[in-house]
Image (cartoon, grey):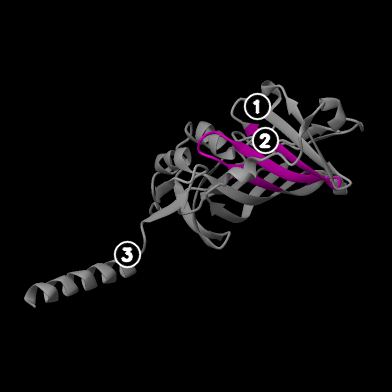
Amino acid sequence: MKKRNVFLISFGVFITLTFLLGCTTTTYKDIEGKTVQVERLPDDAPLEERLAQLDKLSYMVNYEMTIENDDDDDSAKMTIEITQFVDSSGNLRQDGVVEDKQIRQYIKGEKVYTCINSNNEWSCGELPSNEADVQNIGENLQEYMGQYQLPFTKTKKIAGGNSACYGMSSMGFDVEYCFSPEGVPVLMRTESDFFKMKMEAKSYSLGISGDDFELPAEIGDLEAVSEESGSVHIKSNTPGVDVDIDVDW
């Protein structure tokens, strides 16, 4: 009976500590169905620890990107919604809507694909690997931020949760990057006297399914995707964050 009482007391202490301290890890299923465990870092964790998290993360994020130039006309400001699917094995998908056309770009292993939905009909084509415009935001952040030890500044409520933010102001530029507790990039912001760019997550989730990387149509001739003339090129112009949609159709 005494042993049981000791067990119950110990279990009660464990439950109390878990409640008080909060869960320090998050688990999810990767693209192969394996369980992945990610540590939830404290708010003021060093930047290099945030960047190290990116190597093991698989996630989906809905971003709203706003770009504003110092011009007088209405075209100086542009807002576009972008959804990214990122798999820790290197697969990447980016969705957007340009001039009422749904555009999806994929990197699957060494293959690069572009798919366009026009008049409710999908067309897909394969591109040379060196023409990939879809960018892994996490990898770009690792490359750029690894060169600059941005300090922790504050926490912000982004995409429904408290996010840790890092930034600096120097030579007329104000730069800020924020991460979810699991390490997902949820805010990239750059401002100057003549240019503003903000890419903020509206929602995100951990884990990617294999269905997320299934193409919506069979691979056709690239000319089939490019029957109409036109091109859209959207670029953040932010060091280390190069989010392009550059597609002919």
Q: Is residue 62 visible?
A: yes
- Tell me residue 157's x, y (percent): 54, 61
Q: Which mark is residue 121?
A: none
Question: Within 10 angstroms of label 3, few (less than 14), some, or many (20 or more) residues?
Answer: few
Task: Inspect the image, locate mark 2, and give the three-letter code of the amino acid beneath it.
Answer: Tyr
- Residue 7 in the figure: left or right of residue 230: left
* Disc with the residue nearer the chain's start (2 vs 3): 3
Is 96 one of the magenta-colored residues? yes
> Which residue position holds label 3?
21
Q: Is residue 39 above or below residue 144?
A: below
Q: Quadrant of the C terminus?
A: top right
> Which residue position holds label 1?
111
Q: Which mark is residue 106?
A: 2
Q: Quadrant of the N terminus?
A: bottom left
Task: Inspect the image, locate mark 1, and give the three-letter code of the amino acid beneath it.
Answer: Lys
Task: Give the spatial CA distance, label 2 vs label 1.
Answer: 8 Å
